[in-house]
Amino acid sequence: MRRLLLTEAISPGRGGRVRALGAGMSGPAGSIGGACRLAGMVRLQSEPIDIVAVVASVADPEHGGLATFLGSTRAETAERAVVALEYEAHEEMALAEFRAIVEEAEARYGARCALAHRTGLVRVGEPSVAVAASAPHRPQAFAACRYLIDQAKTRVPIWKRSHYADGATQWQDGVQSAAS
């Protein structure tokens, strides 16, 4: 089975957006995949997050600070054993909002930013979301990183369902379904 990786990036040097849809994309430096030299990378993907690619996409020799955040599935929430989280998203709207958040952070903090989020089933210990920001100085890199994750959590149309060890599931809004 082939899984798709949906990637959008804003290329400051090329004056436009690059959108690619494919399986296991890779390419030379300056392209989507591999050692990206694009600012503003956003990804919504069913495959595990390539943290190295996320960090590489914001690396800049003019920037002295680079901050990252990884959000992973916890083994327990509300005193219940969790086996996985399941994410669903409205892809077009989520990518548009990711782009807006990245553009805001880049303008506000003078940073290069990237944001990647999983869809589908994410097992305990696996990253669900990764953000990275580089900036000329450490305070701006940390601030941009914090801005990215905080805004993504509150603004992006991504829904989360917990899968518990007892077989029950529960959407983040509290709607429960019985174990099947």
Image: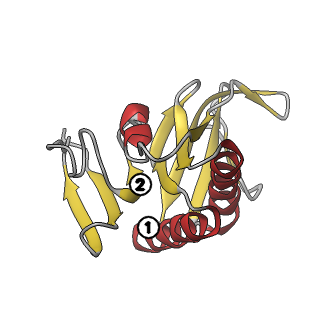
Q: Give percent across and percent down for residue 10.
A: 35, 66
Question: Of the residues shown, which amino acid type is indicated by label 2?
Answer: Leu
Secondary structure at numbered mark 2: strand
Mark 1, other Cα within 10 Å: few <14 / some 14–19 / many ≥20: many
Q: Nearer the viewer, residue 102 or 91?
A: 102
Relative vertical location of residue 12 with respect to residue 22 in this rendering, above or below: below
Question: Which residue occupies 77% across, 55% down?
Answer: 174
Q: Nearer the viewer, residue 43 or 103?
A: 103
Q: Give percent across and percent down for residue 96.
A: 46, 73
Which coloring applies here? secondary structure
Mark 2, other Cα within 10 Å: few <14 / some 14–19 / many ≥20: many
Question: Which residue occupies 38% across, 46% down?
Answer: 57
Relative vertical location of residue 116 with respect to residue 10 in this rendering, above or below: above
Instruction: Give how far apart the Cα atoms at labels 2 and 1 are.
Output: 7 Å
Quadrant in the picture for the C terminus: top right
Q: Nearer the viewer, residue 159 or 127?
A: 127
Quadrant in the picture for the N terminus: top left
* Contact between labelled residues 1 and 2, with CB atoms less than 8 Å apart: yes
Q: Which residue is mark 1?
A: 95
Question: Of the residues shown, which amino acid type is indicated by label 1?
Answer: Leu
Q: Give percent across and percent down for residue 92.
A: 40, 72
Residue 27 position by quadrant? top left
Q: Which residue is mark 2?
A: 44
Relative vertical location of residue 69 with respect to residue 88 in this rendering, above or below: above
